[in-house]
C-alpha cells in the first residue's frame, strides 16, 4: 500500500479543476470556490466554537448549549448541556417544515420481481410514513423492555426496517449497535456480550446474490452463549423457515404493526450515547467505537451537505452503496442524509445481481444525482466491462464519491470518464469509523482534484503529517496522520475500555489524535494516504485486524501458529495471506484440501470477508532472534517478492529468514 501511495505522488500530476458544468448543475454550491473554503477552514480552526455553533444552529435543539466545546484531552464534549434528538432532526423536523410528503428513503430489494413495474421491488417512504413506522417500532422496543440508555443490537439485512429500528432506538434514547449481516455467530456473541444487549433485532434471512443468508439461524446459534438476551425481534423478509424460541422470539409484523403511530422523542443530552459500532484494531478483540448524539448529528449532516453538495428541492437522489453495517452506511445512508431532505437510496443486495448492470440500472431508474462507492467496487466494475454502464443512461449524475481505501489513479480515471462522462467531480473522502464523518476530502465546486489524493481537510479538522515527536513533516515526507484539535464527529471512547482508547489514539503522539494511517502531503498541501501503520489490513475497504484472523486460524485443531499479512490484490486492494504451522500429525495434510477447510473455518468464526485468499503452510514461522515474527519478510513473500508463487504445500522459510534477519 505504502509503495502504491508514493508512486502515485511521483507519477500522478493530472489536475481536475472544479468545473462550470457542476456549478450549473447545482445552482449555488454550498462552498462555491477556493477562497470560500480557505476562509471557512481558517475560521473553523481559529474559532471552532463560533464556527460549529453557527453550523449547529441549523438543527432543532430542545434546550440550548451552555458551551459549544469542552475539551480536556482526550475527552471532548460538544454542545454541552444541550438536549436534542437526532430522530427528530431526521424526520419530525421535515414534517414540521411542511415536507412530510417528500421522499425520505427509496428502497430497492434485490430479487427480480416481475409483478413490479421495473422488475424489482421498490419502496418510496415519505417522512410522514417513516415517522409512523419509527414510532410503532419505538413502542415495540419499549414493549420488549428497552428503555433509555440501553443498547440494542441490530443484525439485519439492508431492509427499511433496519433504518426504522435505528431511528426508533434514537427516538427513545436507546443506543444501537449494528452488526454487519456478513458476520458469523461467534462475532455476534462477542459484540452482543460487550454491549450487554438484552434485545436483538434481526431478519429471518437476507437476500444476497440470489441466495438467502440465514440471519436468524446465526442469532440462534449466538444466543446459545448469550443467556442475557431476553428478546429477539424478527423481521420476515425471505420467508425462510426459522426455528422459534417461545417467549424470546417475537415477529416484527405481530408486535410492531399493533403499536400506536405516534411516540414523542425523548429529550437527550448532546453527549448521550447514540451508537456503538465495532471495528477492528491491533488486538484480537474488536473495539466498540462510541459516538454521541449532538456532535455526530451536526458533523455527519454538515459534511454530507458540503462534500456531496446536497440540496433539497432540486431533484437530487443520493445513493451510497455501503451496507449500514459499516460506518459509511450509518453516516451517509441514514444520519447525514435525512436531515438534508434529499432522498437516500438504499439497496438491499449485491451489485452484480441479477447482472453486472444492476447499479447502473438503478442510477437510471431512480435518476441518481450523487453516487458514493468504494475503490474495490470501482475496480470490479472495470473488470466487468464498460458495456454495463454504457448500456444505461447515467446523465442524471452530477457527482461521484469514493471511500474506504486509497483509490488507484487508473480506477479514478475510469470512474471519471466511464461513469462520470468526464463531467462529474470525484470526491475521494478519507475518514474512519472513529471520525464519524469525512476528515479529508475535496469539496466539489472549490477544490481541484488529483487522482489518488483525498486532497484537503474538512472544516474543523486540523489534520497534519507529523513524526513521533509531533513535529510537522515537510512536503512529500511521509509520517503519521494526526488531528490536532477535537472535531464534533470524533469518537468519545471505546466501550468499556478507557485504557485502550487512550493508548490507541492519544499516546503515540501526546496531545494529538493518531489515525493509524501513514500519509504525506504534497507541495500543494494535498494529503496522500499510504496505508495503515498498525496490524490492521484494509480488505475491500473493510478493516480487519490480522490478530482476529490469526486467532480464528489457531482455533482450528490442525493449527499451532498463524501469521496473517496483507498482499496486493487486483480487486480487493489488499488480500489476505495466512502463514500457518501445523500440529503433530497434521504436517502430511498440508495441501489444498486443508487450506480450503481453514478458509471455511475462518468464514464460520468471523465471516466471509475475513477468509484468507492464500494459505501457506510452513515448517515454522520466520522469527528474529528475540522471537518476533518477521512480518515484513512475510509481507514480501506474500507479495511474491521473494519466493514467487502461492503455495499450499509445506515450505521452509527458515533459509529466507536467515538471509533477511539483519534488516528486519
Ligand atoms: C480506514 C478506516 C470511513 C469509511 C470506510 C472505512 C482507510 C478510508 C480512505 C480514503 C485512503 C482510506 C484508512 C482509514 N480509508 N477512506 N479515501 N483514502 N484510505 O472505515 O473501516 O473505519 O477504516 O480506511 O486506512 O484509516 P474504517
Image: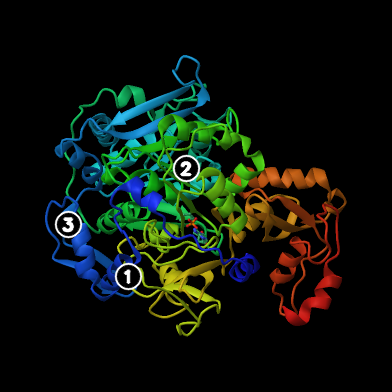
* SS for callout 2: loop
Residue 400 image position (x, y, % from top left)? 46, 48
Q: Report crowding for label 1: few under 14, some 14 to 19, many 20 or more residues within 10 A (C-alpha).
A: few
Query: Can residue 299 be seen here?
Result: yes
Q: Where 225 sits versus 214, above or below?
A: below
Mark 1 vs mark 2, CA separation in Å:
33 Å
Per the image, the residue denoted by label 1 is: 38
Residue under the image location 41 percent in, 25 percent down: 122
Q: Where 525 sits versus 320, above or below?
A: below
Per the image, the residue denoted by label 3 is: 57
* SS for callout 3: loop
Per the image, the residue denoted by label 2 is: 323
Residue 377 image position (x, y, % from top left)? 57, 46
Which quadrant would residue 295 be assigned to in this image? bottom left
Of the 4 image quadrants, the one containing the N terminus is bottom right
Of the 4 image quadrants, the one containing the C terminus is bottom right
Q: Are the residues at dot 1 and dot 2 in contact (C-beta closer than 8 Å)?
A: no
Mark 3 vs mark 2, CA separation in Å:
30 Å
Q: On the picture, is 591 further left or further right than 394?
A: right
The number of numbered badges drawn on the structure is 3
Amino acid at each position: 500500500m505504502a509503495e502504491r501511495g508514493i508512486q502515485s505522488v511521483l507519477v500522478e500530476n493530472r489536475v481536475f479543476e472544479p468545473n462550470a458544468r457542476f456549478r450549473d448543475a447545482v445552482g449555488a454550491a454550498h462552498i462555491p470556490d477556493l477562497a470560500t473554503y480557505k476562509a471557512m477552514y481558517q475560521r473553523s480552526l481559529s474559532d471552532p466554537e463560533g464556527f460549529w455553533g453557527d453550523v449547529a444552529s441549523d438543527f432543532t435543539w430542545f434546550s440550548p448549549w451552555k458551551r459549544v466545546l469542552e475539551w480536556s484531552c482526550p475527552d471532548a464534549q460538544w454542545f454541552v448541556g444541550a438536549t436534542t434528538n437526532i430522530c427528530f432532526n431526521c424526520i419530525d423536523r421535515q414534517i414540521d417544515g411542511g415536507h412530510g410528503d417528500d421522499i425520505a428513503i427509496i428502497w430497492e430489494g434485490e430479487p427480480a420481481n416481475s409483478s413490479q413495474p421495473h422488475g424489482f421491488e421498490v419502496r418510496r417512504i415519505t417522512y410522514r410514513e417513516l415517522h409512523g413506522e419509527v414510532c410503532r417500532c419505538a413502542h415495540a422496543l419499549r414493549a420488549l423492555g428497552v428503555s433509555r440508555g440501553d443498547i440494542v443490537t441490530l443484525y439485519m439485512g439492508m431492509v427499511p426496517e433496519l433504518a426504522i429500528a435505528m431511528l426508533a432506538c434514537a427516538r427513545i434514547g436507546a443506543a444501537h449497535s449494528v452488526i454487519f449481516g456478513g458476520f458469523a455467530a461467534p462475532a455476534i456473541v462477542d459484540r452482543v456480550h460487550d454491549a450487554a444487549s438484552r434485545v436483538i433485532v434481526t431478519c429471518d434471512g437476507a437476500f444476497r446474490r440470489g441466495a438467502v443468508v440465514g440471519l436468524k439461524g446465526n442469532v440462534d446459534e449466538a444466543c446459545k452463549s448469550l443467556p442475557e438476551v431476553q428478546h429477539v425481534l424478527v423481521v420476515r423478509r425471505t420467508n425462510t423457515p426459522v426455528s422459534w424460541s417461545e417467549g424470546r422470539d417475537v415477529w416484527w409484523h405481530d408486535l410492531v404493526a399493533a403499536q400506536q403511530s405516534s411516540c414523542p422523542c425523548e429529550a437527550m443530552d448532546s453527549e448521550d450515547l447514540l451508537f456503538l459500532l465495532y471495528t477492528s484494531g491491533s488486538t484480537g478483540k474488536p473495539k466498540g467505537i462510541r459516538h454521541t448524539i449532538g456532535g455526530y448529528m451536526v458533523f455527519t449532516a454538515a459534511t454530507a451537505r458540503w462534500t456531496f453538495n446536497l440540496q433539497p428541492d432540486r431533484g437530487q437522489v443520493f445513493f451510497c452503496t455501503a451496507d449500514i453495517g459499516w460506518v459509511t452506511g450509518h453516516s451517509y445512508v441514514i444520519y447525514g442524509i435525512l436531515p438534508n431532505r434529499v432522498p437516500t437510496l438504499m439497496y438491499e443486495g449485491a451489485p452484480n445481481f441479477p447482472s453486472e448492470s444492476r447499479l447502473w440500472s438503478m442510477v437510471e431508474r431512480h435518476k441518481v444525482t450523487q453516487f458514493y462507492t468504494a475503490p474495490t467496487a470501482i475496480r470490479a466494475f472495470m473488470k466487468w466491462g464498460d458495456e454495463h454502464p454504457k448500456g444505461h443512461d447515467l446523465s442524471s449524475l452530477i457527482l461521484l464519491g469514493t471511500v474506504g481505501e486509497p483509490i488507484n489513479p487508473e480506477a479514478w480515471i475510469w470512474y471519471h470518464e466511464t461513469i462520470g462522462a468526464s463531467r462529474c467531480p470525484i470526491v475521494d473522502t478519507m475518514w474512519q469509523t472513529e471520525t464519524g464523518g469525512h476528515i479529508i476530502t475535496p469539496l466539489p465546486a472549490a477544490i481541484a482534484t488529483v487522482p489518488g489524493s483525498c486532497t484537503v481537510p474538512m472544516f474543523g479538522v486540523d489534520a497534519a503529517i507529523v513524526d513521533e515527536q509531533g513535529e510537522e513533516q515537510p512536503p512529500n515526507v511521509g509520517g503519521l496522520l494526526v488531528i490536532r484539535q477535537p472535531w464534533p464527529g470524533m469518537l468519545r471512547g471505546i466501550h468499556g475500555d478507557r485504557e485502550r482508547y487512550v493508548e490507541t489514539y492519544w499516546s503515540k503522539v501526546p496531545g494529538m489524535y493518531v489515525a493509524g494511517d501513514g500519509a504525506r502531503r504534497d507541495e500543494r498541501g494535498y494529503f496522500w494516504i499510504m496505508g495503515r501503520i498498525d496490524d490492521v489490513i484494509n480488505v475491500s475497504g473493510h478493516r480487519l485486524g490480522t490478530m482476529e484472523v490469526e486467532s480464528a486460524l489457531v482455533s482450528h485443531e490442525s493449527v499451532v501458529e498463524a501469521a496473517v499479512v496483507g498482499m496486493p490484490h487486483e480487486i480487493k486492494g489488499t488480500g489476505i495471506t495466512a502463514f500457518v504451522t501445523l500440529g503433530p500429525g497434521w504436517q502430511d495434510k498440508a495441501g489444498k484440501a486443508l487450506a480450503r477447510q481453514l478458509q471455511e473455518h475462518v468464514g464460520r468464526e468471523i465471516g466471509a470477508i475475513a477468509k484468507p485468499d492464500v494459505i501457506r503452510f510452513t515448517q515454522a514461522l520466520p522469527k528474529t532472534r528475540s522471537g518476533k515474527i518477521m512480518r515484513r519478510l512475510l509481507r514480501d513473500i506474500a507479495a511474491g517478492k521473494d519466493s514467487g508463487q502461492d503455495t499450499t504445500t509445506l515450505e521452509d522459510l527458515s533459509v529466507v529468514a536467515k538471509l533477511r534477519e539483519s534488516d528486519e
